[in-house]
Image (cartoon, grey):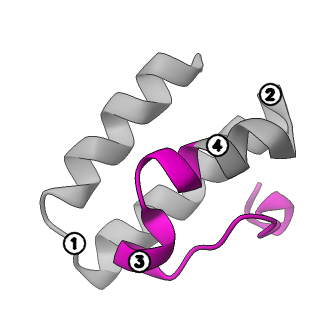
Amino acid sequence: MNLDRARELIEVQLQFSSGYNRNSVRMILAEVQKLHGQGAVNQLIRDLDLEQKFDLGPGSNFSSLR
């Protein structure tokens, strides 16, 4: 998954903002972490304000979700 596609998918999840959508975002971030590394995850978290919206902060490790 490229970063633009990940951003699109997360933006769709943000429109709903339920607990299920938070889990979906975590799965997307796990895939991004696997393919692009922690820096890309941190950037998405900052750019999309995921800390405020889903309590997902920069530096969070999503590798256990793979």
Query: Label 1, on which residue?
Result: 17
Dot placed on the residue nearer the N-terminal end, 2 or 4? 2
- The answer to if 33 sits in the magenta stretch is no
Dot placed on the residue nearer the N-terminal end, 2 or 1? 1
Question: How many numbered discs?
Answer: 4
* Nearer the camera: disc 2 or disc 3: 3
SS at mark 3 in the image: helix
Image spot of residue 62 (x, y percent) = 76, 63
Query: Dot 4: within a 10 Å radius of its alpha carbon, few (fewer than 14), some, or many (20 or more) residues?
Result: few
Image spot of residue 4 (x, y percent) = 46, 19
Q: Quadrant of the N terminus?
A: top right
In the rendered view, tell whether residue 37 sits above or below residue 48.
above
| Numbered label attached to residue 52 | 3
Query: Label 2, on which residue?
Result: 35
Query: Dot 3: within a 10 Å radius of its alpha carbon, few (fewer than 14), some, or many (20 or more) residues?
Result: few
Disc 2, disc 3: CB below 8 Å? Answer: no
Disc 2, disc 4: CB below 8 Å? Answer: no
- At a point 82% along the width and 66% down the height, the residue shown is 61
Query: At label 3, which amino acid type do we have?
Result: Gln
Dot placed on the residue nearer the N-terminal end, 1 or 3? 1
- The answer to if 50 sits in the magenta stretch is yes
Image spot of residue 64 (x, y percent) = 83, 67
- At a point 57% along the width and 74% down the height, the residue shown is 56
Q: CA distance from mark 1 to mark 3?
A: 11 Å
Query: At label 2, which amino acid type do we have?
Result: Leu
In the rendered view, tell whether residue 58 sits above or below residue 56.
above
SS at mark 1 in the image: loop
Image spot of residue 51 (x, y percent) = 51, 73
Segment tinted magenta in the rendering: 44-66
* Nearer the camera: disc 2 or disc 4: 4
Query: At label 4, which amino acid type do we have?
Result: Gln
Query: Label 4, on which residue?
Result: 43
